[in-house]
Image: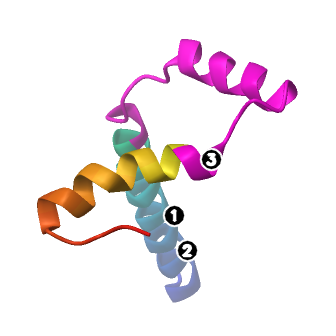
Amino acid sequence: MTETHRNSDHRAAMGDARLSRWVDRVQRLPDLRWDKVMRVRRALESNAYDPDALLDAALLPLGQDLGVTCR
């Protein structure tokens, strides 16, 4: 076996290992909650989605826990 062929085999094995790790990571991701996806899509389509209000609602308790004032 030539040195070039050995290097090529090594690179292929490394690529397979990386791919295997990524597949494992993807499989461990939580399931997508389609009900939430569809609710946000409908809100976006009807211009009822207010990301600023949602962000404020999420940050307010965090700020209270940290003892800081948001806004």
Q: Which residue is drawn at 15% across and 67% down?
A: 66
- Indicate the amino acid at tag 2: Ser
Give the CA separation, mark 1 to mark 3: 44 Å
Which range of residues does the magenta coloring cover? 26-53
User: Looking at the picture, does residue 42 appear above or below residue 48?
Assistant: above
Label drawn at residue 22: none
Of residue 25 and residue 61, the one placed in the foreground of this image is 61
Q: Name the residue under label 1.
A: 12
Q: Residues within 10 Å of mark 2 (few under 14, many from 20)?
A: few
The amino acid type, in three-letter code, at marker 3 is Pro
Question: Height in image: 69 above or below 30?
Answer: below
Judging from the image, what secondary structure is the residue with disc 1 in? helix
Mark 2 / mark 3, whichever is N-terminal: 2
Looking at numbered disc 1 in the image, what kind of residue is underneath it? Ala
Separation of marks 2 and 3 at Cα, in angstroms:
49 Å
- Residues at discs 2 and 1 in contact (Cβ within 8 Å): yes
> In the depicted view, which residue is nearer to us: 6 or 38?
38
Residue at x 35% of width, y 45% of height: 25
Bin the neighbour count of mark 1 within 10 Å (Cα to Cα): few under 14, some 14-19, many 20 and up.
Answer: few
Q: Locate residue 33, reporting x and y percent.
A: 49, 19
**Residue 51 got which mark?**
3
Q: Name the residue under label 2.
A: 8
On whether residue 36 falls in the magenta region, the answer is: yes
| Residue visible at 38% across and 32% down in the picture | 27
Q: Quadrant of residue 10?
A: bottom left
